[in-house]
Amino acid sequence: MENSLKGQKAIITGSSSGIGKGVALSLAAAGADIVINYAGSKEKAEEVASLASQFGGKVLVIKADVSDETEVKEMFSKTIQELGTVDILVNNAGLQKDAPFHEMTLDQWNKVIGINLTGQFLCAREAVNEFLRRGINPHISKALGKIICMSSVHQEIPWSEHVNYAASKGGIMLLMKSIAQGYAAKKIRINSICPGAIRTPINKDAWGTPDSLNKLMNLIPYKRIGEIEDIGKVAVWLASDQSDHINGTSIFVDGGMTLYPGFTTNG
């Protein structure tokens, strides 16, 4: 889908590493001007920006904590000032703070909900306001704007000792659907990508050794771990006019994890 996003401006939150990095590079390769958002390492964000700039589009690096309303507003304001508008938001920023439920602290709960769920609310609200302010440009896209929410297979699959994470992803599912329902008539498209096990630093313990990788394969019927490029390709398609009639949908990129492979032999 070369140049399928030509002329469009995209913010990808949490894009200094992992899935966000993969999505940012894929959108840049498809012709979009992009914003690399980060909250931690500026050096990593600039490394991604350097890679993305090789595709010829404009690339901005903006630090913002997506759970902070003021910082989110400033990120959108700077993007609009530098790039003119926002056509695509990829709500990717997320983290885990794991603990057995009876030991989970309120801080662990609030941190994950704040970044993973409230952060998506704050960024989506700013994006929708910008879409409505700008108006549609049919030479750029059939849609007024596109939002892609990064969810997880755990919006469907319960996950013991990760209750805060699973709850945040379940919340993203209905956040996405409710916004999509409310703004479809305005030609705003909002969908989710739900990754399974993807080879990123956040879950290296699950794939970093032959033994751990073999164990992981018991959960993946397709018998391979996902790569960040698998997510990036879906993000480009959802952001493009090729998916113009797709709205309010969760797309699982998981090699079949949600098929509950434990029941292959009748459980």
Image (cartoon, rainbow, N blue to C red):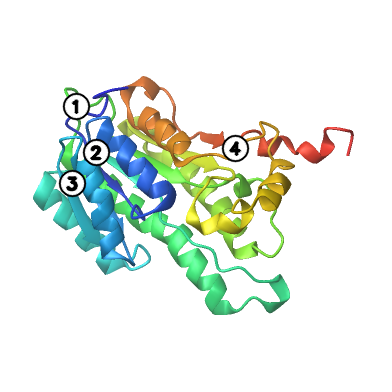
Q: Nearer the viewer, mark 1 or mark 4?
A: 4
Quadrant housing residue 228: top left
* Front one among 148 and 3: 3
How far apart are the two marked residues, 2 and 3, measured between alpha carbons?
Answer: 15 Å
Q: What residue did someone put label 4 on?
A: 254
Disc 3 packing (10 Å; few <14; some 14–19; many ≥20):
many
How far apart are the two marked residues, 4 and 2, measured between alpha carbons?
Answer: 27 Å
Per the rendering, the mark at residue 59 is 3
Residue type, numbered disc 4: Asp
Residue type, numbered disc 1: Ile
Q: In x, y percent, where is residue 65?
A: 33, 66
Of callouts 4 and 2, the N-terminal one: 2
How far apart are the two marked residues, 1 and 4, measured between alpha carbons?
Answer: 31 Å
Question: Which element is circle 2 on?
Answer: loop
Residue type, numbered disc 2: Asp
Circles 2, 1 touching at the beta carbon (< 8 Å): yes
231 left or right, relative to 23: right
Circles 1, 4 touching at the beta carbon (< 8 Å): no
